[in-house]
Amino acid sequence: DAKTTQPTSMDCAEGRAANLPCNHSTISGNEYVYWYRQIHSQGPQYIIHGLKNNETNEMASLIITEDRKSSTLILPHATLRDTAVYYCIVRVRNNDMRFGAGTRLTVKP
Amino acid sequence: DSGVTQTPKHLITATGQRVTLRCSPRSGDLSVYWYQQSLDQGLQFLIQYYNGEERAKGNILERFSAQQFPDLHSELNLSSLELGDSALYFCASSVSGTSQETQYFGPGTRLLVL
């Protein structure tokens, strides 16, 4: 599976958009980009995933660059409850989902 | 709430002991995954079961074993426990375990070995 690189930490003001970047320059053509988050030692929570096209759901938007070497997770209106560690994962096999260190997002009032 | 349940929530035991962690997947999911999250290692995949059969192994120690029962719940057995086994253990499930399915995680079991 392709390796990902994420910033260690980020801050965001409450009510503003949070944009979390992820680099995956060695991604292969059949690998999807997945985003999960983990709030304070709870189980990781699925957010969104995509292959080539931008995706949006009720939680977030995922923007994948045309060359697929990077992506950005967008939380449009961050709340205090969005404070968590966000993991970007690229994978083709479902049975070896590799979580890196993630980005610790702190939403501040 | 992901629909995946895990028991117990907390477990405290002593070195050398054996414990069993239990997971019930989401209704309709046939595949179960176990992960370990320790402070220094992050989240690591241990093992996957699909419909009662082992499908894949990750970084699972020989002292650890798992099984999935006909009702699809799964148990992770940890034996000869060491201090370093203290961690959060998560179970996840997906419909059939094929490549691009989303895994849904349970709340975890926090194990403390003293």
Image (cartoon, rainbow, N blue to C red):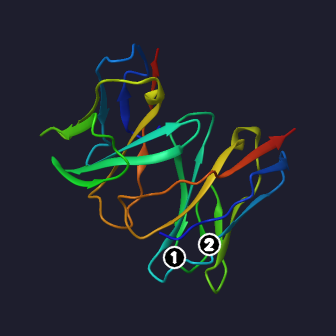
Q: Residue at x 57, y 78 (%)?
A: A26
Residue B29 in view: no
The chain ID associated with circle 2 is: A
The one nearer the camera, A23 or B80, is: B80
Give x and y (percent) for residue A33.
54, 68
Give x and y (percent) for residue A48.
55, 61
Q: Residue at x 48, y 83 (%)?
A: A29
The one nearer the camera, B33 or A19, is: B33
**Please, what secondary structure does the residue beneath circle 2 have?**
loop
Q: Residue at x 35, y 52 (%)?
A: B58
Check disc 2 and report the residue beneath it. Answer: A24
Vertical order, A32 against B39 (above or below): below
| Badge nearest the viewer, 1 or 2 | 2
Q: Give whichever of discs 1 and 2 has the lower sequence position.
A: 2
The amino acid sitting under disc 2 is His
Check disc 1 and report the residue beneath it. Answer: A51
